[in-house]
Amino acid sequence: MLKKHNFGAGPCILPSAVMEQAAQAVINWNGMGLSILEVSHRSPEFEEVVLKTQLLVRELLSVSDNYSVLFLQGGASTQFAMVAMNFLSEGKKAAYLDTGYFALKAIKEAKLFGEVDVVATSKDKDYAYIPDNFKVDAGSAYLHLTSNNTIEGTEIFDFSATGVPLVCDMSSDIFSRKIEVKDFDLIYAGAQKNMGPAGMTLVIAKNEFLEKGKKEIPSMMDYRIFRDNMSMYNTPPVFSIYVAMLNLLWLKDQGGVSGIERSNIEKAKLLYAEIDRNPLFYGTAEVAHRSRMNVTFQAIDKGVEQAFLKFAAEKGIVGIKGYRTVGGFRASLYNALPLSSVAVLVEAMVSFEKIYTD
Ligand code: PLP
């Protein structure tokens, strides 16, 4: 069967070479006569997988030794609560930037633990931009940002220091571009965009910051417990970690994060140029804040939208329907999506315009 051009936002977009290796490991891992799913997570073979995956994260993102690399569960949504449970309490305040759907979810959870100061919001323009003019109270426990707004299609490119610890949800753009880990105190990301299958959550945290965390919290919510137990305090998401390792090896082969960043810039440029040229479509995010991972755009009317969805599907293009609450289109350009697929989408938009306006 012809492989589809998958612009979907998840739950997991991986290169086909990685999918094939993963499939083989499910049947017979490393010729051991056992599936990766049934090998003990306490075995030296699997411990090596965890170690290697951690080292790959460190290498690809240049993470220094004063940071811990952890593999947790519960998705980024659990991090919304876990961050606040660890670092916020009654009488304390944390700053949050409201840039859309997931930022709001993080805000909602944090309010359960202490005072939340929403320092700025872009709600006034349906989250089409990233607010950049805000003040953070020096007494805040941390400032929480969402680096890429998966639904609204905006991305933060400037992480200026504010003088308080920086916590960032990087679920949908981690490993897609270079970042300075040292600018952040804690980064978290659900694995399922650019890292591996859903089931594991990556956390990269400064040890000094982790020490500031509360002590009286459940073990499963305590970062230090995972740090001190090699991310294996309980049964880890074995398959997700293993496939993440395969995928990070693939990423290394692509020239690492800087190699993939060049390709991601090229993909985004190609698609945005067509959206801006084609009279049947328009982009929804402000140009300076356009995401390279999730390109959100609209058709000039519902008729064009429906007709193009059908036209694109006939060409093997899937996953371009916008998020249910926003409508329109969203083309996700995660690392595993090749430039050739973006070219197919752009060609489809060009030929659709000719047919539709004839
Ligand atoms: N944050 C962002 C930016 C996301 O894109 C997502 C999911 O797509 C989440 C949080 C929620 O992640 P999870 O489903 O892993 O809880």
Image: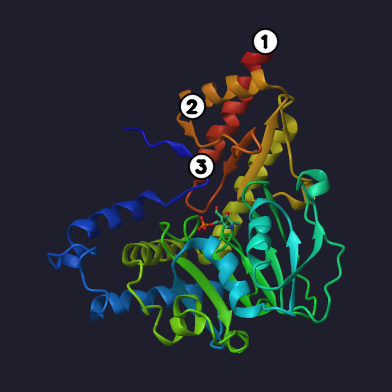
Query: Badge 3 local density, few (<14 within 10 Å), some, or many (20+)?
Result: many
Q: Secondary structure at mark 3?
A: loop
**Residue drawn at (71%, 24%), measured in percent from left and top?**
280
Give the total of numbered labels.
3
Res. 259 in view: yes
Displayed quadrant of residue 1? top left
Residue 328: % across, % down: 65, 32
Circle 2: residue type: Ala
Q: What colour-coding does the image apply?
A: rainbow
Between discs 2 and 1, the one toward the N terminus: 2
Mark 1 lies on residue: 358
Q: Which residue is mark 2?
A: 313
Q: Quadrant of residue 353?
A: top right
Amino acid type, callout 1? Asp
Query: In the depicted view, which residue is nearer to us: 303 or 53?
Result: 303
Estimate the x, y position of residue 8 in percent, counting from the top left.
Answer: 51, 42
Which sits in the foreground, 92 or 159? 92
Going 70% across and 73% down the picture, which residue do you hit? 114
